[in-house]
Structure formats: structure tokens, C-alpha cells
Amino acid sequence: MKGNEMKVSRRPYRLVGVSLIAVASLVLAGCSSDSDTGSADTSVTEEGASDELVKVTLITKDSTNPFFVTMQEGGKIEAEKYGVDLTIASGAKDGDEDGQIQAIEQAIARGDQGILILPNGPTVEIAMAKARDAGLYVIALDTPPIDPSTVDITFATDNREAGTLIGKWAAAQLDGQPAVIALLDAFTDKVISVDIGRNQGFLEGMGIDVADGQKTGDEAETGTYSGGAGGDYTIVCNEASEGNEGGGRTGMETCLLKNPDINVVYTINEPAAVGAYAALTAAGIADSVIMVSVDGGCAGVQNVKDGVIGATSQQYPLLMVTLGMEAIANIVRTGETPVNTSGLDFFNTGVALVTDKPVDGLESINTDEATAICWG
């Protein structure tokens, strides 16, 4: 391989706005599974490489969000291809830092060679650094750590781009009308890079000055937006949803109490959007609200088709897991390491705007196209 670039075999995806590193993967064959964690008895690798299984733990934020379930279930299947003995762990819920820290400590004690993790918060990053000090190769998936030195590399969606795409789409739908905006983030009491990227990207896409740019909630509450035809805006609220349906509904209800005239809703992910839609429906205004989100899961794409969500930015979680497992297998067997996407401090796994109401000059795919590749 040239320049220590990591290369991976995968299905051809139509990824909007990103060019992935071209690749020819480490070939693993003759694997047979001996457990539901994706472990295998033997593996055939490149000449000179060890045929021992590489022990990896995948630590997701929880085990209920469909995004993380896709990673877990897909990872078990893909692990066999790379000669990886995969252990699955997670926090009890999104934001559970203690549960993830325990999983990291168990991976170290077990003698794992690598960890794939979607960090739940800053104390988890301290434990990730300890794992690296113990000799484990640590890769973040989906959620870049606040401190990049706590991981060897991150495989993730460009969350700022994901937010920008849906922000531009929302501004275009307004066609110059005043925007009365509700922001439903994951958390308001802790700093998570996904929250910052998607929230700030959405506002930037709307054409709203985001002040610091690395914080949420410090924008002017009123002003003008320059996206689409431009117009006036009011930010009604920044509420936490914890990325789930119940939190999305509660957060939306709180926002409606502050201002019942909300006509634009941004949500951190699609489960939160479903909850927000329930609150809007109960208030009798769901049909008059522009709802945008991020994830692009199969259920989320169906919600776009059904009109629950106007547009979403599609991610590729199984690709993240596959890249992560191959990276750890490569570093253990050959010493070859992956590199970041040019100009970024992570490896960009791609994003596509999904909507059935396309906007001139804004590249997107429709729900039929998105369904064919959802969460690959």
C-alpha cells in the first residue's frame, strides 16, 4: 500500500459531497464462526501475516437506538471477514459514561488489541486515553472525541456537513418566510462533538451567524437568515432529547410552551424527530412545520417518504464499523495505519441529503434511492 492508506472492499454507495480513499483490502478467507459475537476459529491472511484472531470490542452509546443496533449486528457479520473476534458492549443509554468506561476497562483486562467506540462524554475520553497507554488501538466511530489525542483515528460522517445540508434545504422551503426555530439537540449539559457539528451546521446552512461556532446556544435569539430567499428568524429553544423518541416529544412540548408558532424543527436524529412529530401532531400543527434531521436509517427514510420528516442527512454506520475492524486488523498484522481524509482530522465516511422535495443547486437523493442503501 502507498502512503499507509487503509483500503477496504465495500458495496458501491452513492455518497454525496465526499470522496473516499480508493482501496484494495486485506483478504481474509476460510473463516468459520464459533459464537454470536462474530469470532472465528481460523483466518487466512496475506503472506507473512499472523493467522490469529484479532480481539476487538465495539462499544456503542446504547443497544436500543437503531443506528447502534445496526452497528452491532452488522459488525458481528463483518467481523468474520476480517478475522476479528468481536465483543459487543454499550452504555445503558445515550450519555451513560460509566457504562462505557467499564467496557473499556474490561477490554483492557481481557487483553483486547483494539476498541471501536462512540464516546458518550468527556470522562469516557479519559478512559480511552488509558486504553491507548495500555497498548490498545482505539478508534472512534461516528462521534469524534473532543480531544483527538484520545484515539488513533476517527471514522465518521462529517456532521457539520450533514447539518449544513438540512439547513440549506430548510431555508429553501421557507421561501423568505420568518423562521421560528426549535433546536432539539442530544444534550444541553455536556459537550458532544456530534451535537456541535450538526446543530451549528444546520444554523450555518440556514445562513444564521453561529457566533463561536464551537458552542451551541450562544447565537442571537433573533436576527436574519441568508439561506434560500432569506428572511427573519427567531430561535425559540435549545432542548435536550437524548436522541430518543421520548426525549424528542418532551423537548418539543417544552418548546411549544415557549412559542406555539414554531415552523422549523431541527432534531439531532430521527428517533427524536418521531417524538417531536408526535408533540406537533397533538398540538395540531404538524402539517405546517418543516422538520429536518440526521441519520438516514431505513425507518427514518420511510419517515421522509411519509412526510413526517422533510429531509434527513444519511450516514453509513456499517461502513464505519467495517473500516474500524479492518484498521485494527491491519495495524496488528502488518503495522499499516489508516490516514485521515485530506483537510479533516477524521476519515469521512460520507453523507447524502435525502428528500423527495429536491432543491435546485442542492444535491440530494430521493427516498427510493436512500432505501436501497440505508445504513450500509
Image: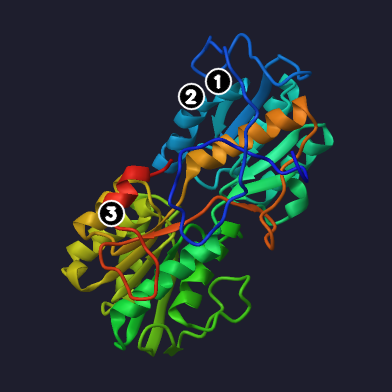
Q: Residue at x 46, y 59 (%)?
A: 16
Identify the secondary structure beneath mark 3: helix
What residue does disc 1 label?
A: 80
Distance from label 2 to label 1 (Cα)?
Answer: 6 Å
Mark 2–mark 1 CB contact (< 8 Å): yes
Foreground residue among 236 and 267: 267
- Given the image, on which type of amino acid does mark 2 rest? Ile
What residue does disc 3 label?
A: 367
Can you tell which mark lies on residue 70?
none
Distance from label 1 to label 3 (Cα)?
Answer: 31 Å
Residue 292 image-quadrant placement: bottom left
Percent x, y for residue 271? 35, 51
What residue does disc 2 label?
A: 77
| Residue 175 visible | yes
Percent x, y for residue 359? 32, 73
- Horizontally, is 364 left or right of 187 in the view? left
Q: Residue at x 54, y 65 (%)?
A: 160
Foreground residue among 174 and 355: 355
- Horizontally, is 184 left or right of 92 in the view? left
Mark 1–mark 3 CB contact (< 8 Å): no
Quadrant placement of the N terminus: top right
